[in-house]
Amino acid sequence: MSCTKANKNTNLIKKVNKKSLIKRLLKTEAINSISWPKEMKAISSLVERFPDPIFWNSISLSFKLNSLCWLLSDKGRQFLNIEYKKYKLGSDLVSKNEVYILGEKNIDSFENSDTLKRTSKISTRDFLNLWPKAKH
C-alpha cells in the first residue's frame, strides 16, 4: 500500500507535541493568558509548513515570544526559513559523514612492495607508471 503525501504529512504532524512546543517557545507570563485555540492553530500551520518533527524538537530560540503569531509574520517566516536551512544543512552534513576503515593489510602490502624501496629520485613519468593504466 502506498501512502499519499498528505497522509505522510499528517503522520509527521502527530509526532510533534504541540502543547509542550508552545510552552517552550512562549514567555512564562504569556502562557497564563494566551488563547490556546489561536496558538494551536498557529502551531498547526507552522508544523504543516515545516513538517519535520526533529526540527521542531530541536529548535530553540534565543528569545521568548508573546504569541506564535509572530512566526507567521514576514519576519517570523524569514527567521524560520533561516533556522530550517541551518537545520537541514547540519543534518545533511551529519548524514553524509562516512567512516572509512583502513586495514593494516592494505598499508603493509604497499609498504612491503619494491616500489617504496627506491632511494634515488624518480621522474614524474616513472611515478605515474607505478600504477597500471585504466582500460577503457
Image (spheres, rainbow, N blue to C red):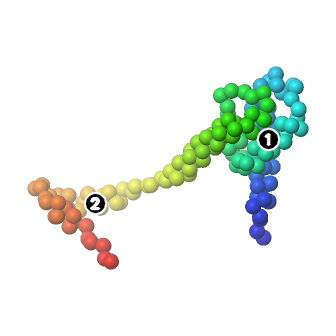
Sequence-wise, which precedes: disc 1 or disc 2?
Answer: 1
Front in this rendered view, residue 19 or 69: 69
Q: Secondary structure at mark 2?
A: helix
Q: Residues within 10 Å of mark 2 (few under 14, many from 20)?
A: few
Residue that protrudes farthest toward the bottom in the picture: 136
Amino acid on which the number 2 mark rests in the picture: Phe
Q: Is residue 3 left or right of residue 126?
A: right
* Residue 50 picture location, percent across and down: 71, 47
- Residue nearer the viewer, 19 or 71: 71
Residue 104 at x, y percent in the picture: 36, 56
Q: Is residue 42 above or below residue 25?
A: below
Please tell me whether mark 1 or mark 2 is closer to you in this view.
1
Whether label 1 touches label 2, CB < 8 Å: no
Name the disc covering residue 17, or none: none
Quarter holding residue 5: bottom right
Q: Nearer the viewer, residue 62 or 102?
A: 62
Number of numbered discs overlaid on the protein picture: 2
Residue 4 appears at what percent x and percent y?
77, 64
Tell me what residue is drawn at x 76 percent, y 55 percent: 9
- Find disc 1 in the rendering and name its residue: 43
Examine the image and state in which quarter residue 126 appears: bottom left
* Residue 97 vertical placement versus 132 (above, below): above
Quarter of the figure that contains the C terminus: bottom left
Residue 34 rendering spot, x and y as whole percentages: 86, 29
Instruction: From the viewer's perspective, tell me whether residue 36 is left or right of residue 74.
Output: right
- Disc 1 marks a residue whose amino acid type is Ile
Disc ID at residue 110: 2
Q: Residue furthest top?
A: 29
Residue displayed at 73% across by 37% down: 73
